[in-house]
Image (spheres, grey):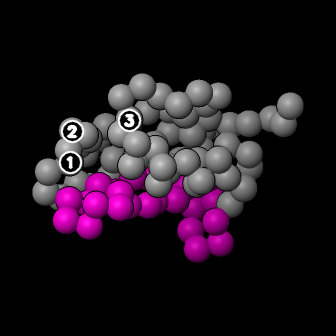
């Protein structure tokens, strides 16, 4: 099995009302299994980026090779998540 790194997901900002109750400062670590209590929209938007970071990949548009940020698909109540590779 390939060597992987855990990835910490943190809520950076939240506007309006998040129906799942996510708020600024919430965080969880993703390793081999998905964490409990994370809404499906957050999990869906974060998953591709978490997977890349877990397996050592980088994003050319990010200034930090160990992190990237994405937003929830709810345009009226956006939640922005940061994914950060933990080494």
Residue position marked by numbered label 1 in the rendering: 18
State the quadrant of the C terminus. Answer: top right
Mark 2 or 3 closer to N-term? 2
Q: Residue at x 36, y 28 (%)?
A: 37
* Vertical order, 8 against 32 (above or below): below
- Which percent across, then down, holds residue 73? 35, 61
State the quadrant of the N terminus. Answer: top right
Q: CA distance from mark 2 to mark 1?
A: 5 Å
Q: Residue at x 14, y 51 (%)?
A: 17
- Which percent across, then down, holds residue 47? 55, 48
Residue position marked by numbered label 3 in the rendering: 38
> Mark 1 and mark 2 in contact (Cβ < 8 Å)?
yes
Mark 3 secondary-structure assignment: loop
Report which quarter residue 85 is drawn in. Answer: top right
Mark 1 secondary-structure assignment: loop
Q: Residues within 10 Å of mark 3 (few under 14, many from 20)?
A: some
Q: Residue at x 20, y 59 (%)?
A: 77
Write down the region rendered in magenta: 59-82
Report which quarter residue 65 is drawn in. Answer: bottom right
Residue position marked by numbered label 2 in the rendering: 21
> Mark 1 and mark 3 in contact (Cβ < 8 Å)?
no
Q: Is residue 36 magenta?
A: no
Q: Residues within 10 Å of mark 2 (few under 14, many from 20)?
A: few
Mark 2 secondary-structure assignment: loop
Mark 3 or 1 closer to N-term? 1
Q: Nearer the viewer, residue 24 or 33?
A: 33
Q: Residues within 10 Å of mark 1 (few under 14, many from 20)?
A: some
Q: Residue at x 23, y 54 (%)?
A: 14
- Which percent across, then down, holds residue 38? 38, 35
* Vertical order, 73 against 23 (above or below): below
């Amino acid at each position: 099995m390939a060597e992987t790194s855990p990835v910490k997901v943190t809520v950076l900002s939240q506007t309006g009302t998040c129906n799942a109750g996510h708020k600024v400062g919430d965080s969880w670590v993703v390793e081999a299994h998905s964490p409990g209590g994370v809404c499906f929209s957050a999990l869906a938007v974060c998953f591709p980026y978490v997977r890349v970071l877990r397996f050592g990949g980088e994003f050319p548009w990010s200034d930090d090779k160990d992190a990237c940020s994405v937003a929830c698909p709810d345009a009226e109540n956006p939640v922005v998540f940061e994914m950060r590779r933990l080494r």
